[in-house]
């Protein structure tokens, strides 16, 4: 039964989970993602400097490399971690709180597939300086893909009939059959090898992040023995 005590336990568990998972993601990014990102920014900056010689574009503020960038990255990661932990915790509450943290790793895996893997099949992580389709089109496709993937996985896991399970499988593949929006002229300032390294690093970092969210929520929000 959902009551004030249950809600309080959920929020506390999500705060601890988001804090720890966000810090873990930041640490992994510092090792795996940020070095590649900094290399890509060198190529992007070269293009920016060349374009600036012919224009007077205003450059938006961004944190300096080093502790300032790490701080804002950690803050963003922790915020994401808390939000996703609340989401997984709410689903756990509806489906039944786990008795052990290992059981909740499956929820973390489902979140990873839903929010990262499936959208990334059409819109892979991009290094700075990569040409992309219109932001609104990408956001719409991402949202549709997340909703279809989440519902599709739910039907495959919990539906009682083969018809519903088949419908779940259709939902999983439908966004990819439609296809993600692509730029009119693909291109990137960074070399293709660097872009691929960044994609691999992002996949690994997000896997760690989501499995940490699932495992930590299972530990902090598990049902009493």
Image (cartoon, grey):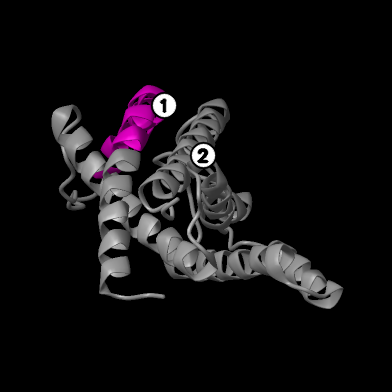
Residue 207's tag is 2
Q: Residue at x 56, y 47 (%)?
A: 103
Q: Is residue 91 visible?
A: yes
Camera-side residue: 45 or 67?
A: 67
Within the image, what quadrant is residue 159 found in? bottom right
Helix, strand or loop at label 1? It is helix
The dominant secondary structure in magenta is helix
Helix, strand or loop at label 2? It is helix
Within the image, what quadrant is residue 47 found in? top left
Segment tinted magenta in the rendering: 23-52
Left or right side of 74 for 145: right
First-in-chain label (2 vs 1): 1
Q: Residue at x 45, y 50 (%)?
A: 225
Gap between marks 2 and 1, in whole Å? 18 Å
Q: Residues within 10 Å of mark 2 (few under 14, many from 20)?
A: many
Residue 136: give x, y in percent of width and height: 44, 70
| Residue with the mark numbered 1 | 36
Left or right side of 54 for 125: right
Residue 49 magenta-drawn?
yes
């Amino acid at each position: 039964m959902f009551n004030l005590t249950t809600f309080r336990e959920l929020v506390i568990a999500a705060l601890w989970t988001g804090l720890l998972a966000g810090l873990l993601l930041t640490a992994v990014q510092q090792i795996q993602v940020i070095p590649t990102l900094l290399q890509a920014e060198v190529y992007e900056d070269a293009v920016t400097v060349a374009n600036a010689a012919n224009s007077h574009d205003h450059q938006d503020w961004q944190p300096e490399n080093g502790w300032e960038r790490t701080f804002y990255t950690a803050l963003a990661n922790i915020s994401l971690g808390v939000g996703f932990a609340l989401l997984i915790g709410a689903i756990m509450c509806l489906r039944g709180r786990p008795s052990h943290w290992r059981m909740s790793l499956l929820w973390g895996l489902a979140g990873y597939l839903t929010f990262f893997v499936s959208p990334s099949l059409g819109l892979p992580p991009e290094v700075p300086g990569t040409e992309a389709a219109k932001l609104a089109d990408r956001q719409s496709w991402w949202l549709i893909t997340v909703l279809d993937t989440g519902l599709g996985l739910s039907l495959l896991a919990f539906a009682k009939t083969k018809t519903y399970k088949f419908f779940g499988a259709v939902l999983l593949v439908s966004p990819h059959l439609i296809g993600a929006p692509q730029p009119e002229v693909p291109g990137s300032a960074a070399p293709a090898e660097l872009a691929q390294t960044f994609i691999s690093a992002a996949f690994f970092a997000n896997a760690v992040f989501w499995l940490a969210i699932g495992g930590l929520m299972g530990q902090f929000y598990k049902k009493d023995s």
